[in-house]
Image (cartoon, rainbow, N blue to C red):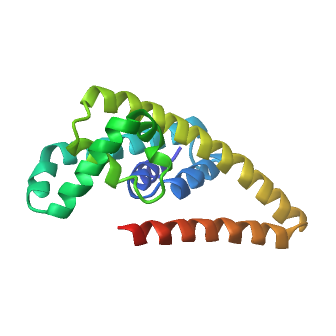
Amino acid sequence: MNPIGYLGIFVGAFLEGEVVYISAIQAARAGYVDFYGAIATFFLGTFFTDWFYFLTGRRQGRHYLERSEKLQRKAAQIDQLMYKHGTLLLLSYRFIYGFRIVLPLLFGVSKLSIKRFLGFSLLSTSIWMSVYGWIGYYFTTWLMEQLKSGRGVIGVLVVAGLIGLVFWVKGFTTSKKY
């Protein structure tokens, strides 16, 4: 199989999440890369991304916090959230749209232990990949069947539009909060 494809998957995992993962699954289905190789490569890229940001926050975060009261308040909020809802936050941070970079950085700045982040990073990435992998595989299978048969093209476009609208609204409302 093409090693450039795996490099693209790894780098894509660092830059973007869901779209690259679903694209990697489709590339595997089309025979461009090995299915399990694509999943393993994406997992490593995603895991590396989380750790890059976590360790960046751990190493340089306090320096930036000392220079900004606004960031100090945000870090204090994350510490408070970690105290109250740490397990839930660590399990779900990959699913919170728009925070896949910010939260690992703030986890690194917080008092969260490296060992605890390791365990939850492995677990949350596995859960996230399972959910999006299943959705990506089966939704795109259904979508391709609809498009090949000519049935429901309007329905497919409506569903795709609604999904796009949901992501747009979530992104819009997320960006307005901060």
Q: Is residue 95 above or below residue 88?
A: below
Q: Is residue 77 above or below residue 40?
A: below
> Which residue appears at 41% of the width and 44% of the height?
46
Please identify the quarter of the rendering in which residue 115 is found.
Answer: top left
> Which residue appears at 43% of the width and 55% of the height?
12
Judge whether residue 105 can be spotted in this image.
no
The front one of 70 and 155 is: 70
> Which residue appears at 48% of the width and 57% of the height?
97
Task: Tally the numbered discs.
Answer: 0
Looking at the image, residue 51 sits to the left or right of residue 94; the answer is left
Residue 177 picture location, percent across and down: 40, 67
Judge whether residue 82 can be spotted in this image.
yes
Looking at the image, residue 136 sits to the left or right of residue 50; the answer is right
Please identify the quarter of the rendering in which residue 64 is found.
Answer: bottom left
The front one of 152 and 162 is: 162
> Which residue appears at 46% of the width and 31% of the height?
123
Residue 158 picture location, percent across and down: 77, 71
Looking at the image, residue 52 sits to the left or right of residue 162; the answer is left
Image quadrant in which the C terminus is located: bottom left
The front one of 100 and 157 is: 100
Residue 152 picture location, percent across and down: 88, 67
